[in-house]
Amino acid sequence: MTIWLTNTATRKKEEFTSLDPQNVRMYVCGPTVYDRAHLGNGRPVIVFDVLFRLLRHVYGADHVTYVRNFTDVDDRINETAQNRRAAGAVGTLEDLIRERSDETISWYHADMDSLGALRPTAEPRATGYIAQMIAMIEDLIAKGHAYEAEGHVLFAVDSWKESYGKLSGRSVDDMIAGARVEVAPYKRNPMDFVMWKPSSDDLPGWDSPWGRGRPGWHIECSAMAYDLLGEQFDIHGGGNDLMFPHHENEIAQSKCAGHGFARYWLHNEMLQVEGKKMSKSLGNFFTVRDLLDHGVPGEVIRFVFLSTHYRKPMDWTEKKREEAEATLRKWRGMTDGVAAGEVSKEIVETLADDLNTAGVISVLHKLAGEGDAAGLLAGAQMVGLLTDELGDWWFDEADTPTDQFMEKAEYWINQRTEAKKRRDFARADFIRDRLAEIGVMISDTPEGTKWMLNSSAARVGEWGILE
Ligand SMILES: Nc1ncnc2c1ncn2[C@@H]1O[C@H](COP(=O)(O)OP(=O)(O)OP(=O)(O)O)[C@@H](O)[C@H]1O
Ligand SMILES: [Zn+2]
């Protein structure tokens, strides 16, 4: 089985070979944990989850290491903590920062679990690797690739000028001409970037050979990847918005430290809103949680993402949501109670062709059309659809109320109406609450009391609790 991946570093679709098939290693840049993930942030999570699943399928589940970090050193996190302190929250700034990061990480886990993403093998937090970052910076200074200036340590792009910019295909001179670079007086070249910066007393900081300070963003990924995956590893991923400067800078630091670093670079395209990247800074975003809270199942979100190839821009539309939901309802109905068969060769080959998830969905439609429920289930599960974990939004026809259930429900709803007429509100509320436990959700409307079945209620159909 050959996996083909489009390597940004060469701009070609290449045959993937692993350095060590016993331990295939992948690093993906994770979120900065200052706020809820927006829908766009969900895209790389799903794309690299699909790659993780494919690698596990081909090399074996125990032979793949997937690292995705949490960036928990960031001025936006500091700001939320400072605001909380200003609003009267107790604790040191460090405590409040920790609290904010912990909270954001738990939201991130809950939201990404809802999209059916497997947890990576390791999820390092930048604050746990400060010593490794300092060691790497010292090494780069010793090798002549970095210099200290006014409490900052900067990477000297001129020390690696011929290679800097290769990934994104620009020369240092082009970058200077095109970029809005921060021109700090202590920079030797305007493209030099910060690896360490000083912290004032009201900011988090760590002791270092250059005084109390904190790391820049890029060195975090270089140091964590080195520590957890070694000098060289197979795949590095992230959104294409990170290609420059973040990935370019990771490469410069790691290569100049003498590491082979990543062999294949994969970048997902952006989720857009009216032609622009969905992003926090543009304010054109909604969160994954917003959608889930509005009743859009995580499985439907996942399906919509899989319908577009990862290297194409896409947007979120109501029409896509509807179609995804209708398809999933049909497939769930077809595969209910069915045991998964073998994953077809066609599915694996399609997926292995540069993660052609849209192609996989076409094959799944074909299997559904042929009535091959076992094959459909196995193929869908290969890309994380139709799994048990994602199934709780759907219930099968057998869950629609029987006549007997309907009669009972109507009877008790009438009892409640009578109780309300008698102004026996305690009794009315008792009946309403017991009905909810049984799975009868009622709402009082101007047209009278309406109800619907909630088949995931705690005690569906246990009428005894009302007698
Ligand atoms: N609109 C988008 N579509 C796809 N991927 C995105 C989008 N926006 C961000 N990402 C990806 O999400 C991951 C987490 O990014 P990060 O935490 O830096 O985002 P952020 O700073 O919160 O978001 P923003 O880019 O909106 O300011 C990165 O891999 C990034 O490439
Ligand atoms: Zn990174």
Image (cartoon, rainbow, N blue to C red):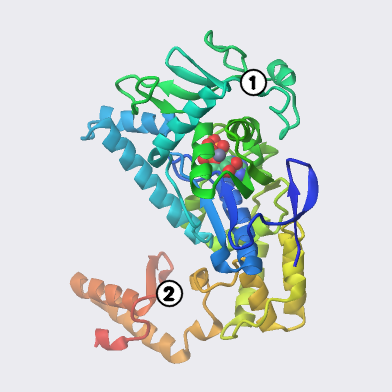
- Where in the figure is residue 409, as x and y percent of width and height? 38, 83
Instruction: Judge whether 273 appears above or below 300 on screen.
Output: above
Q: Taking the image as drawn, is residue 407 in sight?
A: yes
| Amino acid at dot 1 | Ser
- Name the outermost residue toward the front: 142
- Where in the figure is residue 214, as x and y percent of width and height? 40, 27
- Name the outermost residue toward the bottom: 404
Q: Within 8 Å of ligand 1, the CB of disc 2?
A: no
Q: Are the two marked residues, 1 and 2, in contact with CB atoms closer than 8 angstroms?
A: no
| Residue drawn at point x = 27 percent, y = 89 percent | 464
| Amino acid at dot 2 | Asn
- Where in the figure is residue 327, as x and y percent of width and height? 67, 70
Q: Is mark 2 on a helix, strand or loop?
A: loop
- Residue sitting nearer the eye, 246 or 255: 255
| Residue drawn at point x = 44 percent, y = 77 percent | 455
> Nearer the observer, disc 1 or disc 2?
1
As drawn, the label of residue 246 is: none
Q: How crowded is mark 2: few (under 14 residues within 10 Å), some or many (20 or more)?
A: some
Left or right: residue 426 compared with residue 415: left
| Residue drawn at point x = 73 percent, y = 70 percent | 347
- Name the outermost residue toward the top: 185
Q: How crowded is mark 1: few (under 14 residues within 10 Å), some or many (20 or more)?
A: some
* Residue to which mark 1 is pinned: 159
* Residue to which mark 2 is pinned: 454
